[in-house]
Image (spheres, grey):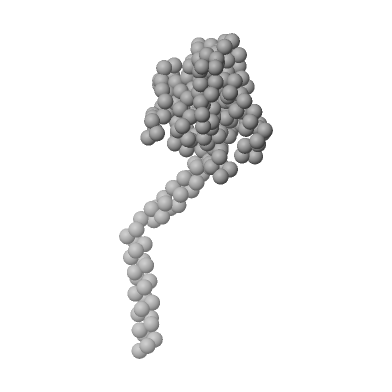
Amino acid sequence: MKRSHALYSGSLALLIILVLIAIVPANSIVSAAMETYAIKSTGSVVTAIFLRNTPENGLSPEKIQSVLKEKGLFDSRRNPLGKGITHAYEIQKAGKVVHDRVVHIIWQQSGSQKKMNYAGAKHYISKLNSDQFAGYNDWRLPTTEEAMSLMQSVKKKCGLNIDEVFDPLQERAWTSDIRKEGTAWVVRFDSGYCDYTYTDANIKYHVRAVR
């Protein structure tokens, strides 16, 4: 009797398994596995975008507009149809820097805590390098292309057109590009566009360094 009971229990368990297999579509199990694989595969693919990293003298509005359109960078005045870049940000160095794996550059997560004129901006960069901020000594002012790569087409909760991974204090920042003698390009995350302005002692903006 005990042996018959064991056989009955085993047969019943097998019957339940067969019923479940019949009810649940086999392709759903395969599909789930494929979706998981696809997510991992897609997540590991990062398409590189290359931007000019050396300063330019005499950078005209016409040329910067051409670059914005060519690279699809958003500017509320010069390229309002630009979608901007889909970044792959990674916070590093205990939150001090943000590595952009799409553009292959590293930004300060924050930046200067005070506004400063252009000469002050250059001094700020020199100080970062002498102090080896975050362990690096090759910090610099970004080019207009690099700074505009941070520009998002939609304002975030912080009220700026920049990802909230960054400190919102630096709502406007200097670049390394010169329009003409006495003027340099500035990126305005509060207004969504770039423009050039005077570099005299009365004009002050923040700095967000890059390397």
* 168 relative position to 52: left or right: left
The x, y position of residue 135, in whole percent, is: 65, 39
Q: Identify the residue at horizontal 35%, vertical 70% (top origin).
A: 15
Left or right side of 133 for 87: left
Residue 49: image location, x then y, percent: 55, 29
| Nearer to me, 13 or 88 | 88
Marker count (numbered): 0
Q: Nearer the viewer, residue 42 or 106?
A: 106
Instruction: Choose top left, top right, bottom left or bottom right for residue 55.
Output: top right
Tell me which residue sits at (56%, 33%) in the image: 107
> In the orientation shown, which residue stands out farthest toward the bottom?
1
Quadrant of the image containing the C terminus: top right
Q: Position of residue 42 (x, y in %)?
A: 49, 41
- State which quadrant residue 17 falls in: bottom left
| Viewer can see residue 64 | no
* Quarter residue 157 falls in: top left
In front of the other: 73 or 15: 73
Q: Position of residue 145 (x, y in %)?
A: 54, 23
Is the residue 78 above or below the residue 85 in the image?
above
The residue furthest front is: 202
> Looking at the image, which residue is at 36% across and 66% down?
18
Vertical arrangement, residue 31 with respect to residue 133, above or below: below
Which quarter of the rendered picture does the N terminus lie within? bottom left
| Residue appearing at x 67%, y 33% in the figure | 130
Residue 126 visible (yes or no):
yes
